[in-house]
Amino acid sequence: MPRMKNAVSGVLSAAAAVTLASAAHATDFNVPGGLLENALDAYSRQSGIHLLVPSDEMAGVRTRGVQGALAASTALTRILTGTGFVAKQDMSGVMGIVREET
């Protein structure tokens, strides 16, 4: 029985390592500065992550964009920095962009 327990433990450790590596996987982002809504569209295309975006609230809001090999979460945070918006993930895993709480 100890062999089985060690094998299961090893498989779980390997699965956890793969999950962590996937989460930290860098993508080469090239999201130009400009209108936030356009930058978020570019981010979604480049990351493959669908975002729920309140387009009507973003009219005229600008971002610096982001360039470089980054984790998707880091790239999104940098895109949103200074815009008054933040990313929030709900319990189902859906990622939405909302106004920053003050």
Image: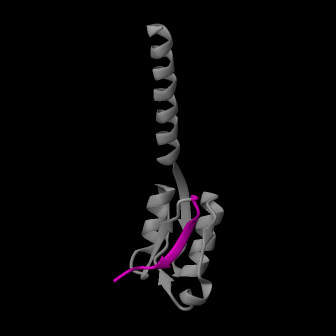
Who's the residue at 61% across and 60% down the image?
A: 49
Q: Is residue 36 above or below residue 96?
A: below
Q: Is residue 33 left or right of residue 45?
A: left
- What residue range appears in magenta? 92-102
Percent x, y for residue 40?
58, 73
Who's the residue at 46% across and 22% down the image?
A: 9
Q: Of residues 48 and 56, which is closer to you in this image? A: 56
Percent x, y for residue 61?
50, 87
- Look at the image and name its color scheme: one colour
Percent x, y for residue 85?
45, 79
Q: Is residue 101 magenta?
A: yes
Q: Count numbered badges in the picture.
A: 0
Q: Residue furthest bottom?
A: 60
Who's the residue at 46% across and 15% down the image?
A: 5
Q: Is residue 69 above or below residue 33?
A: above
Q: Is residue 63 magenta?
A: no
